[in-house]
Amino acid sequence: MSSLAATSPPAPARRFRPGRFIRRNPTLAAGAFILALMAIIAAFAPLIAGDPVLMQPMLRLRPPSAENWLGTDNLGRDVFARTVYGARVSLLVGLTVAFVSVLIGLAIGLLAGFFRTADAIVMRFMDGLMAIPAILLAIALVSLTRASVFIVIVAITIPEIPRVVRLVRSVVLSVREAPYVEAAIAGGAPTWKILARHIMPSTFPPLIVQATYICASAILVEASLSFLGAGTPPDIPTWGNMVASSRLFLSRAPWTIFAPGLALALVVLAVNLVGDGLRDRLDPRLARRM
């Protein structure tokens, strides 16, 4: 009997079936498809659209046509080209803010949750940072420095870090009392090995979901800052700048606001769909119900 078990062929690996994955995860698949499409458009913007800053005063506020698919704005710039290039800034800000805030928040949250002596000091400092609105911080930074995409990323990242720290800390506090962690501590394992091997993997599922929500929030905040004039410079094509420069011509040329507004709504919706889908997949309780 043992010889038969030893010579039996291994079980075939399960192949990835796109149709089955979409049926089981429609929310995640829809969000990922929209995000992938936007990423491809942003990556190949020079091949898809023309010059987004080229001004043609003779063609100002022209309706959509064969030459200008989405019309032109008040300075004669092509709305389609500016919308396509605006995806670059929005995705750059959203992904960068999510990555940096999760990376810094993970490191601080691990230390705050594992070392009891540093917990009180770190969390009081984080509570102070959470009290600073991102928009007000960005306005203050722009008034002290020069408006740029980097300043916008810094201003949005700082208020997001405490939220990640609180999430990681709550996970660490619960995992730290687990028997396998206590056994590693009693066995004299180095602290860095306990954090990296036994505790940090437990923070990945909630962090991945939180990163998607941070990305969506960062995209919205960047558009709001650009609309208020406290974000990226006006010469950089962003969806917030497009809406801000076209709001006075809404009744005369609604297409100038419709295109960037729809693109912004689609991207934020797609990121939230991905976050909800990942939450359903990574949460054992929700996965068990499904």
Image (tube, helix red, strand yellow):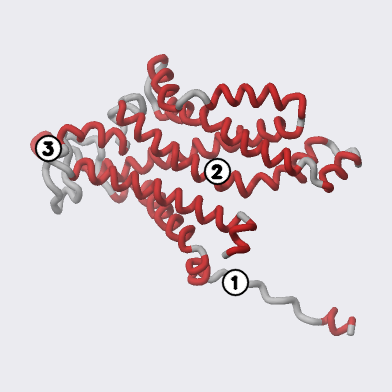
Residue hosting label 1: 15
Which element is circle 1 on? loop
Whole-number angstrom distance, CA of label 1 to CA of label 3: 54 Å
Numbered mark located on residue 191 in the image: none
Is residue 32 among what the camera can see?
yes
Tell me where residue 183 sits by quadrant: top right
- Of residue 87 and residue 140, the one placed in the foreground of this image is 140
Instruction: Report if residue 44 is visible in the image.
Output: no
* Mark 3: few/some/many CA within 10 Å (<14, 14-19, 20+): some
Tell me the kind of residue under disc 3.
Arg
Q: Which residue is mark 2?
A: 210
**For the point 49% across and 40% down, which residue is it?**
214
The answer to whether residue 190 is left or right of residue 162 is right
Q: Pointers 2 and 3 in contact (CB under 8 A)?
A: no
Q: Position of residue 217 (x, y in %)?
A: 44, 39
Which of the marked residues, 2 or 3, is nearer the chain's N terminus? 3
Quadrant for the N terminus, please: bottom right
Q: Mark 2: which amino acid?
A: Gln
Where does the C terminus fall, quadrant-wise?
A: bottom right
Q: Which label lies toward us, 2 or 3? A: 2
